Image: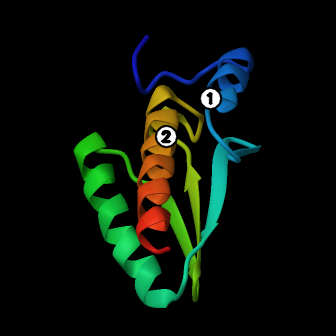
Amino acid sequence: MARTQALSPDDVRRELEKLDDWTHQGDSITKSFTLHDFQDVIAFLVQIAIAAEKLNHHPDISISYNKVRFTCCTHDAGHALTHLDFSLASRISQLAFRFLQMDK
C-alpha cells in the first residue's frame, strides 16, 4: 500500500491502537504535550522538525507557552489519514518520551 493512500476506517483504528494517547478527530490525529517552559517547547520542536524533514511529512503545530499540540493528516491524500501520519505520530511520541526524560 502506498504511504500516501488514504487508510480505511478499520486501518485507522488499528494504527491508532499502536499509539499512546493520540486522538482521532475528523480526518486527522492529534496529541498535546506539556513541557517545562517555552524554551523547552522550542528545543523539542527543533527535533520534530528534523524528523519531519526526514519523512518529508510535516505536522500542523500549535504552541501556547509550555504546551504544544500536533495535528497530522496528509494533505496530498485529500486531507485523509495515511501511513505517513502514523509514522510521524510514532516518531513524535518517541522524541517526546526521550525529551521529557531529559527534562526530569
Q: Are marks 2 and 1 in contact (CB under 8 Å)?
A: yes
Percent across and percent down for residue 74 are 49, 40
Amino acid found under the numbered disc labelled 1: Lys
* Residue at image location 51% in from the left, 49% down from the top: 93
Residue assigned mark 2? 90
Kindly identify the residue that appears in the image at 64 percent across and 63 percent down.
32
- In the picture, which quadrant includes the N terminus? top left
The reply, left or right, for residue 90 in relation to residue 66 is: left
- What amino acid type should be assigned to the residue bearing mark 2? Ser
Q: Residues within 10 Å of mark 2 (few under 14, many from 20)?
A: some
Where residue 76 appears, x then y in whole percent? 44, 38
**Residue 75 can be seen in this image:** no
Say whether residue 41 is left or right of residue 14.
Answer: left
Q: Residue 18 carries which label?
A: 1
SS for dot 2: helix
Give the residue displayed 59% in from the left and 35% down from the top. Answer: 80
* Residue at image point 48% right, 27% down: 83
Q: How far is disc 2 from disc 1 in space, using C-alphas?
A: 8 Å
Going by the image, does 54 lie left or right of 101?
Answer: left
